[in-house]
């Protein structure tokens, strides 16, 4: 953590004036908001490690035997994972908001609602991947690759104008971009990517729905006790 | 109509068949024993019924719901206490049971009442706020059993409920299982303990290597054993094969099972009349007897009748 913050400070000095302007005046604010979102994402992904641990201890069989539908189980897990990550990141989120200065409480509320959904969606995605590949080792590798890809190809660290053109195109469809943008918009940072913040909300909503839905399907189709590594 | 009906229920793990075309029919309100040595496929069968694992072939109907087509509906009727207690992220018995009761949809008032009752009955009340990770195997097992006693599902599955539990605790759990049945649950009891199966079950299915050997009431199963009595003889030396053949020729002896080379189990009629004859036989053949014992057939003899092995031996293989 300390290292990331330090990197942020150094980066702030190094990044050119042009970027400062693109980023809405203060790159450090821009970057701090990005860190919050990256952290939220990483924490929400973490739910899968719970699932692997449960598999190791056989708890998964207990969960699967409970008198509830798979849909309830997956939604419960995704919401639980999302909520937990949100709670973990909340202190940092508040510090960053205070640092940037809250200008519009209404915007913040919208941003929070969207970020809740984002965290649930990430947990849902994480569950989907964990359940469909069932192997702790392969999950680690895949997650590493996915993280590198999804974080780099988003506006969490750099404004879209500062990216190579192909990157920028992809970044526009990245849920992490949506989340970072909506957070910055909520905090009153006039960030650069989306003219309309509601597109971000819409994107997050779609992301959430797709992965919760996929999570349920995979739970139903793939998952059974035993056979996990 | 049967509350549970399995139809050619089969589970393979790779090439290994753990459950092999199982056809069982369980009546509402009975305690149904599933008896077999370790590895017989009991747990695998139960996990399929509770929809935790999926059949490779065949299916089962739980109160009319096909477990492969409507697993959500089937699952809602069942509660299972696992063979290996499943610990969770919540660690005290109080929290484990409350969480379970909550997921099962009990109101907070009912929850408190039942959790308290179960913890008290099972002698866990004093330890309700201690971490289950510090518990002995027997205590964990009791927490596991408490789950279904609280849940009171329509169909309650208990997988080896009293292993690692002392005899007083066993009797307490057996009584609670009976009470659960009397309150309206159908019970499926998987066990490798003959006495437990015999004592509790209205009917017993005996499994071996994934297959059903036989299914009936314990009494009928025991009565079906050839020869109404049995004598166990332990010799000081190994008995040669020829000798066993000769022994079987004695009138009223129906079958001789060689448990170990020096340990014979003799099925026969009117044991008390031929006992002297048998003792004499061994003296004549210069095989000193270490011990001799007369007893009634048990479910083990039913198992032995079908497999040529006692359950204990079957577990060693
Ligand atoms: N997940 C699994 N993968 C591979 N083999 C398994 C698995 N679960 C059980 N088995 C095997 O299936 C057989 C039956 O096991 P089980 O149903 O646990 O028997 P029981 O409960 O009667 O002791 C055993 O030989 C066991 O090793
Ligand atoms: Mg078992």
Image (cartoon, rainbow, N blue to C red):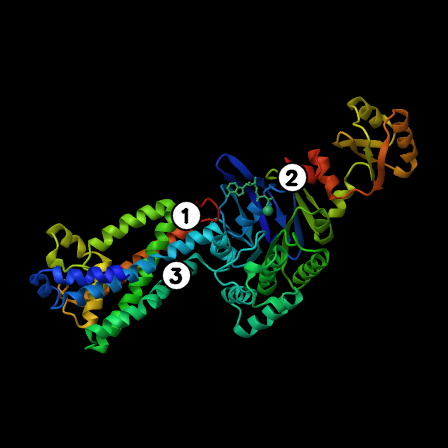
Q: Quadrant of residue B227?
A: top right
> Which residue is tagged 3?
A75
Crowding at mark 2 (Cα within 10 Å: few <14, some 14-19, many 20+): some
Q: Are marks 3 and 1 in contact (CB under 8 Å)?
A: no
Q: Nearer the viewer, mark 3 or mark 2?
A: 2
State whether residue B304 appears in this view: yes
Label 3 resides on the chain identified as: A
Q: In the rendered image, which quarter contains the C terminus of chain B?
A: top right
> Which residue is tagged 2?
B315
The quarter of the rendering in which ligand 1 is drawn is top right
Label 2 resides on the chain identified as: B
Point 58% across, 47% down: residue: B43
Residue A154 vs residue B270: left or right? Answer: left
Residues B264 and B274: in front is B264
- Residue that extends furthest to the left in the rendered view of this protein: A18
Quote the CA–CA distance across marks 2 and 1.
32 Å
> Which residue is tagged 1?
A222
Percent position of residue A182, x then y: 21, 67
Percent position of residue B192, x then y: 66, 46
Tell me the SS state at disc 3.
Answer: helix
Percent position of residue A159, x then y: 14, 60
Disc tally is: 3
Query: Are labels 3 and 2 on one chain?
Result: no
Residues B184 and B163: in front is B163
């Amino acid at each position: 953590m300390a290292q990331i913050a330090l990197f942020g400070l150094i980066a702030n000095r190094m990044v050119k004036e042009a970027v400062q302007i693109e980023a809405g005046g203060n790159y450090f604010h821009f970057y701090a908001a990005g860190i919050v979102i990256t952290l939220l994402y990483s924490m929400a992904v973490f739910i899968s490690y719970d699932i692997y641990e449960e598999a190791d201890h056989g708890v998964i069989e207990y969960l699967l035997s409970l008198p509830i539908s798979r849909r309830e189980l997956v939604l419960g897990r995704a919401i639980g994972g999302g909520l937990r990550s949100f709670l973990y990141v909340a202190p940092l989120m508040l510090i960053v908001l205070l640092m940037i200065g809250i200008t519009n409480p209404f915007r913040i509320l919208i941003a929070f609602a969207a970020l809740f959904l984002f965290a649930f969606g990430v947990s849902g995605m994480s569950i989907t991947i964990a359940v469909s590949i069932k192997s702790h080792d392969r999950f680690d590798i895949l997650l590493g690759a996915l993280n590198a890809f999804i974080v780099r190809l988003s506006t969490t660290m750099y404004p879209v104008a500062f990216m190579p053109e192909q990157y920028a195109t992809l970044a526009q469809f990245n849920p992490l971009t949506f989340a970072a943008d909506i957070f910055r918009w909520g905090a009153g940072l006039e960030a650069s990517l989306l003219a309309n913040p509601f597109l971000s909300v819409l994107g997050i909503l779609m992301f959430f729905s797709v992965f919760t839905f996929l999570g349920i399907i995979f739970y139903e189709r793939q998952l059974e006790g035993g056979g996990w590594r | 109509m049967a509350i549970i009906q399995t139809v050619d229920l089969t589970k393979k793990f790779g090439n290994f068949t753990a459950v092999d075309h199982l056809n069982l029919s369980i009546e509402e309100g009975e305690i149904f024993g599933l008896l077999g040595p370790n590895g017989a496929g009991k747990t695998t069968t139960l996990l399929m019924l509770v929809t935790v694992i999926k059949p490779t072939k065949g299916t089962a109907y739980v109160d009319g719901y096909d477990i492969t087509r409507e697993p959500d509906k089937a699952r809602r009727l069942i509660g299972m206490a696992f063979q290996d207690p499943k610990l969770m992220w919540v660690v005290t018995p109080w929290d484990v049971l409350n969480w379970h009761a909550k997921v099962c949809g009990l109101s907070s008032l009912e929850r408190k009442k039942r959790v308290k009752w179960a913890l008290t009955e099972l002698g866990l009340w004093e330890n309700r706020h201690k971490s289950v990770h510090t518990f002995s195997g027997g205590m964990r097992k009791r927490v596991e059993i408490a789950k279904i006693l609280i849940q009171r599902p329509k169909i309650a599955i208990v997988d080896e409920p009293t292993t690692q539990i002392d005899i007083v605790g066993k009797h307490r759990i057996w009584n609670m299982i009976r009470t659960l049945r009397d309150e309206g649950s159908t019970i499926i009891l998987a066990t490798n303990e003959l006495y437990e199966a015999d004592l509790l079950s209205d009917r017993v299915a005996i499994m071996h290597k994934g297959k059903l050997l036989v299914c009936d009431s314990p009494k009928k199963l025991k009565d079906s054993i050839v020869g109404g009595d049995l004598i166990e003889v332990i010799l000081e030396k190994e008995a040669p094969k020829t000798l066993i053949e000769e022994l079987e020729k004695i009138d009223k002896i129906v079958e001789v099972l060689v448990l170990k080379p020096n340990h014979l189990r003799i099925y026969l009629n009117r044991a008390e009349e031929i006992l002297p004859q048998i003792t004499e036989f061994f003296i004549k053949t210069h095989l000193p007897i270490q011990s001799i014992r007369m007893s009634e057939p048990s479910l083990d003899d039913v198992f032995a009748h079908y497999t040529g092995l006692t359950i204990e031996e079957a577990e060693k293989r």
